[in-house]
Image: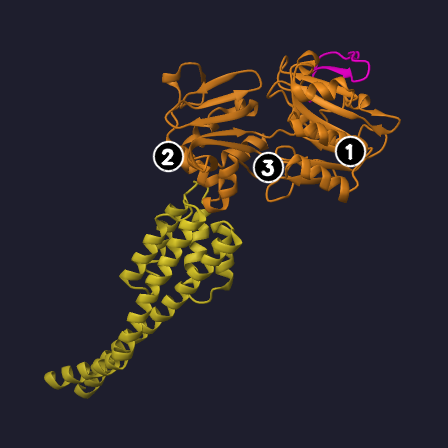
Amino acid sequence: MAGIREVLTYLAPRLRRTLEKMGGALQELEEVRLRAGRPLQVETGLVSTLVTPEGLFTDRKERAFRVTEEDILRSLQLMGENSLYTLEEELKEGFLTLPGGHRVGLAGECLAENGRLVRVKRVTALNLRIARETIGSSRPVLPFLVAEKRPLRIMIISPPQAGKTTLLRDIVRSFSNGEGVPAPVKVGLVDERGEIAGCFRGVPQLDVGIRTDVLTGCPKRDGIFLLLRSMSPQVIATDEIGRPADLQVIEEVLNAGVGFIVTAHAWDTQDLALRPVLREIWLQGLVEKVIILSRRYGSGTLEGIWDGKTKKALPVKPVRLGVGN
Amino acid sequence: MKLAGALLIISASTAAGWLYGSMLRKRRKNLADLRRLLQWLETEIGYNLIPLREAFFRISQRLQGEVSLLATVFIRYLDDPGGLTAGEAWQKTIQNCREKLVLAGPDWMILEDLGCNLGTTDREHQLKAVREGIERIKIQETAVEEQAVKNEKLYRYLGMAAGTLAVLLFY
């Protein structure tokens, strides 16, 4: 509950009051989407719906609360601590991170120079992603991720918004704290988009464990090399791989004799075998275990764990992680 | 009895003259402090790139004299749970402090103009607005300076002289 309450203080008072009327349903929110002149939309683990001025769910847009450009500007100012000049970098990247690790995506009219994006000039849409910490959610999968006291090379795959980052964060935390694994390990976390550790001014806002060194806002390749050189990690963790350059990075990590945990967008192992870069990683057996998540029972449903060498599924039952374990 | 009354009138008008002179001195000091406030703000925005609340907190720690009230009141409004924008918080600060600080109409005008875009534009435009404020305050400072050189003594003596004149007329 603290998560969403925290986020509400960054919204224009009008929006805040409406969302507060939702009461218990607030806890279910994963995203709040604001678009100028359009209805207030929210996403829970299972549904995408609109919200009325009374804080009730509706599918009819004429009944929904209408977000104004003023609401968006006001919210943006509150998010930028009333000092938009401190957000120039964020307006260029198109997102910002709030204390508590919540992420805000920006869209609107952009300013470009010489064919390159300078910044989002006029923000007309905001997407708030509420960071969830489900401490202990990785417990059911941890026994599969370590062999002979050595952390394995792991990939978490799922469609969007099925809890990849949340699971990654909890695996990192468990490895780093030595919970549910034979021995604690030093983790080097390259958090390119600031979503895993939810850093605010460089300090992790979410629990990523006591032996974790975080590089935030750093390109993956540079960050991983930097950590390998300077911080002697036993495991490297990073989010969203899949670009051609990532293959080489993975090979470097492998050469350094270090384990890794990465996430990628793919539905299942068949889908994995179709994606250009991920296919190489999968077919060459560079990963030892693949964890598949879905939204079957809500965000964070464990669909299965596959072995990278035998290319076979391990005997695990689908279960929603972080709920009742 | 008459003599006592006469003395009273003369001393009261002298005091009035003094008071006016001292108001002038106070405004002069406040303008200088205000300029210092904006110069610090320029550094905090331009080089340190820190948010307004923190910037004004740092300034309030350093700034002596009654002008620091502007910084502390502004912070209080920024912390308002109602979620005021920087511009609104600044307007309220001006309303709140108008009676408490010795500054003249044109000085408040400069502050009001500064508040229009406070916190809402990029660094370059914020700095432009702050620098413009500083220049305008400098102009006021020069004007007050000239006025002071010419009139400060005059007001003191004029006060006494006016009192004496009144006494002579009614005696």
Task: Let me know if residue A325 appears in the view.
Answer: no
Residue range highlighted in magenta: A303-325
Q: Mark 3 Cα within 10 Å, few/some/many (few <14, many 20+)? A: many
In the current view of this chain or complex, which residue is farthest to the bottom? B3
Alpha-carbon span between mark 1 and mark 3: 25 Å
Residue corresponding to mark 2: A70
Identified by mark 2, the residue type is Glu
Q: Mark 2 Cα within 10 Å, few/some/many (few <14, many 20+)? A: few
Q: Say which colour chain B has.
A: yellow
Q: Secondary structure at mark 1?
A: strand
Question: Where the C terminus of chain A falls, by quadrant?
Answer: top right
> Does the magenta stretch mainly form a helix, a strand or a loop?
loop
Q: Closer to the camera: disc 1 or disc 2?
A: 1
**Which of the chains bears the disc numbered 3?**
A
In the current view of this chain or complex, which residue is farthest to the left? B169
Residues at circles 1 and 3 in contact by the CB criterion of under 8 Å: no
Q: Earlier in the sequence, mark 1 or mark 3?
A: 3
Q: Say which colour chain A has.
A: orange
Question: Where is residue B121 drawn, in percent x and y?
Answer: 41, 45
